[in-house]
Every structure is written in C-alpha cells, then in structure tokens.
Image: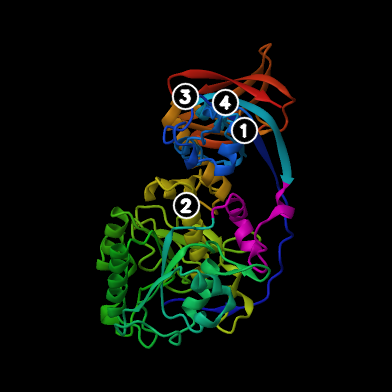
Amino acid sequence: MRSRLTSCFFFLLSLLSFAQTEYHFLVKFNRKSEAHNLNSPEEYLSEKTILRRAEYGFEIDSTDLPLEVAFLDSLQTLNLSIECRSKWNNCVVVSTPDSSIREIILSWDFVNTIESIGYNTTNKRNEDKLDYGESRDQNQLLNLLSGHTRGYTGKNIDIAIIDAGFTNLNNLSIADSMFTSDRLLSTYDFVDDTVFTYTKHGHGTLVSSVLLSNQPGVYVGAAPHANYHLLISEDIAQENKIEEYHLIEAIEYCDSAGVDVINISLGYNTFNSSAYSHNKNEFTGDSTVLNKTCNRAWSLGNFIVSSAGNEGTSSWGVLTAPSNADSVFCVGAIDLALAPASFSSKGNPTVNQTQKPNVVALGKGVSVVQTDGVVVQSNGTSFSSPQIAGFVACLMEAFPQAKNWEIKKALEISSNQYHHPDSIMGYGYPDFEKSFQYLNAKEKSLNNGAIMLFPNPSTGTVVLFSQEMILSLTITDLHGKIIHEQEVNANFDLINLEELRAGKYIVSFKMNEAITHQKLIIK
C-alpha cells in the first residue's frame, strides 16, 4: 500500500454562499383515481364525514376521490418536491429549481394545465441542512453542497471501501448513524478469511471518515446516508503480490453483493521481492490480472474509484495499480489553492492510452477523522478518492437509471479543465451541480430531442445540451443586433448570460453542417 499519512494544519478557504431559486407551479390533473369509486366512500372518508354529508344533503362526488397515486409518482421522478395536494381541486403545487420542467409535465396526458404561481430565492449558505463542520472545504470544492441540498446524500446506494483495516471505527461518533440505521451491510477480511474486528489498521478508518461520517457540526462525509461494505484486502505486514489477489477476491465479492461504488485507496507497483515487482511499461491498462479484473467489474456495472497513488516525487513517479486500469476512475490530489499536489502520481500516456488521472479532489490539507475521533488535516490521494466515490454515489441516487459510463462522463465533462486534460490533474476537479445538470439535460434531450436550453425563461445562467457537437453560439436581440458570441466546441456547457438585460432574444447554434435557432427569455 503506497499511502503516506501526513498530518498538518492547513489554512481554510473562506466560505462562499450561493442563492437558489425555487419555482412554484400549480399542476391540475384531468381525471381522478381509478382505484376508488363513489360506491365505497368508506375507503377514503371517515364514517363521521359520510354521515355529515348526508345530514347536510351533499352527495359524495368525484371531488371526494383521492388524487391518483400514479400521477404523484410520475411527478416525483422529476427534480421537484410536491408541496401541497388538493383532492377537491384535483391539483398539486410543486417546487423545483428547474423552471423548464413545466414543459415535460404539460406533455403528460393526465395533466390538464400547469401554472406558475411564484418563486422563492433562498441563500443556501444559511439554509444548509447539513452542518459540515471540518469537512466543509473539501465538499464545497466539488460543489457537493449543491447535491446534498437537493437531498442527494447517497441514500440506497451501496458503497464498498476496500482497505487495510478500520481500527476503532465502531466506537467513533461519526459512524453512529451508519450503525444505528443498519446501513453497514457487511464486513470481511480477505487476508485472514474472516469477519474482522475493528483493530487491524487505521488507514481504512481515515478513508471511511471522508465518505460515511454523519456528525453535523463536527464532520459530514461525501455520502453520509449511503449503505456500506467494509472490506480488508491489504496485508499491512508485507508487500507481496498476493495482496493483489486478495484485492481481486474483494472486488469479485463486491460484484456478487450488488455493490454500486467501490473505493480502493490502495496501490501496487513494487514488492519485497523485486522479482515479482511490476515495471512502468507493464501497466498498459489491461495487462495485469488485477487490472483485467477491474475492467471486467466495470463492464458488469460496478463503478470503481481508486486513488492515483503518492508516487509523484519518487523515482517511480507514475500511477500504481489498479488506478491505471482502463476502466478504473483514477483520482489525483490538489490543494485548496487548486494546485496539483506534488506527491500525486502522474499518468503515463506513453504506455496507457486512456486519460489518467480522470479527475482530482482535495488531497493536500484534507480533513479526516483519526482512530481516536480527532479531526486533523492530512495528505494523500487515499483521501481524494473517497470524496469522488461519494460524489458518484450522490449522482447515482439522483439518476438511478444512469449507467456507470454516463456517470463517468458527467464527472469528466463538469470538470474545470475538461477541454484540456493533462497527465497531472486529468480533467480537473468536477462540479456536482454541473454533473447534475448534464445528466438532467441528457435525460430531457432524449425525451424531447434537438437542442435543450434551460431554464427558459432564465435569470442569467442556462444549461446547453445537444446530441450533436455545437461549435459556437450567437445571441441577438429581436432587431438582429448581436449581443453575445462565444465558442462552445462541446455538446454540453453552462452559459453565463448575466450581462443580458431582461427581454427576449434569439440564440443561434452553429454545428458542423447546420445552424439552428431558439428563443430565449431573460427575466
């Protein structure tokens, strides 16, 4: 295991607040529940109500029938909350940060009308449902606060943490929530072939804290409400190739157990006996048994996240296994100044043809919880990897139908240097809100076709998504005057239009062989 646990205190970034607008819509249905009928009012009205209807001379009619559950279920598949229900008026009020959702709702055959009834803008800094404590900076860097605020915290997603041991985790208050809510699904030690005790090694405890912690005011992890498997494959007493096979065994177990996300903060390159050590040119992405196993697991639907390794300043320098496997999502490290950490292992593009690393997260000065429950700042890609594993779990909760390659694309395309990746930071650090909007736009584009530009009307920032590459866009007013131009060279982007005054505009999209136009309203 090439993890160096170095503790140091680190200067904290100032905290940023952000505003989010919630749009309120009145949705009226065109029919009532077919599961109930007027001849059996006792199914939905109390005996007292039925008698009172008779006493006052009112017949039981369709207004007394409950709302159709299937209609409500359909609404709840979208990015919204049902705030109010009225059976008498056969309607609901929903709130959503995505104003363009009204077009989808109106297209459903059971919807009569949808009407805007206002909106509310809140400062999310003051509205945080989770008090992150010492973990705020690393969660904020990836904009995970946005996902958590939307309610996506890893619920019903199964995460496996494969590591060297989880000393004292069962006695730490940060993990109480997992134990008391029965979200620990299994534990196993593949080195000793037994259910483990929490005494072997503390590295997995620190790694786990980044993911599963749920102690508001002290520390909240990246996926505080996910389900967990805690697995040991690393033999801390030796550095031998057999450890790779323990890891293979653990990965196969994860597939059998239905695990969604696997975090591996371990890496292998050289061993006690140099005769069995790997060499850099050996790691082509699918050459070793371990890497082939990871690639197969990916093809079967498992999402594997692995630390890049801490070899950046060593003579080895490049990635270790399994992070260099073609299908493994490799995570490097940066600091709070957004600069690459010198220790973070680099990609080896002359040997490995896939982009490595994939992304980065905070790995220098990252907050972790020690085995004694004390929060410290530490260094290592071991701690950047679980942040991304939690990020993935929250996206999976938000988009349960998305495939692992779609989630992978969402992280990469949302990253700050997506258009110019390198072998040090990969695509850069991802942004949860952008990943969410990408998958949301992709889903809507599949349903509606053509180019999606939303929200529309907009207050300034719009999401652009197209099945075809968009080269550039031009915005003109209704008199043909050019107001805004920019290159895009992508099929997804977030466009900042805060410079535009309120009004109506025409957006022209240039593609390879066509130009198409859409109306845009700025409020």
Quadrant location of the C terminus in the rendered image: top right
Check disc 3 and report the residue beneath it. Answer: 511
Residue 397 numbered mark, or none: 2
Kindly identify the residue that appears in the image at 52 percent across and 68 percent down.
212
Kindly identify the residue that appears in the image at 47 percent across and 74 percent down.
314
State which tag comes first along the sequence, 1 or 2. Answer: 1
Counting every numbered tag in the picture gives 4
Q: Position of residue 315 (x, y in %)?
A: 44, 74
Check disc 1 and report the residue beneath it. Answer: 55
Check disc 4 and report the residue beneath it. Answer: 473
The crowd level at tag 1 (other Cα within 10 Å; few <14, some 14-19, many 20+) is few
Residue 407 numbered mark, or none: none
Point out the frontmost of discs 2 and 4. 2
Q: Secondary structure at mark 4?
A: strand
Q: Decide: is 127 above or below 442.
A: below
Nearer to the camera, 223 or 475: 223
Spatial CA distance of label 2 from label 4 is 33 Å
Q: Are marks 1 and 4 in contact (CB under 8 Å)?
A: no
Q: Position of residue 233 (x, y in %)?
A: 35, 77
Q: Amino acid at mark 2?
A: Glu
Q: Position of residue 183 (x, y in %)?
A: 46, 68
Left or right of 211, for residue 248 = left
Q: Which residue range is magenta in the image?
A: 123-152
Q: Decide: is 339 above or below 490.
A: below
Spatial CA distance of label 3 from label 4 is 9 Å
Q: Farthest front residue?
A: 55
Point out the frontmost of discs 1 and 4. 1
Residue 35 inside the magenta-drawn segment: no
Q: Amino acid at mark 4?
A: Leu
Spatial CA distance of label 2 from label 3 is 33 Å
Q: Is residue 455 visible?
A: no
Q: Decide: is 248 above or below 353.
A: below
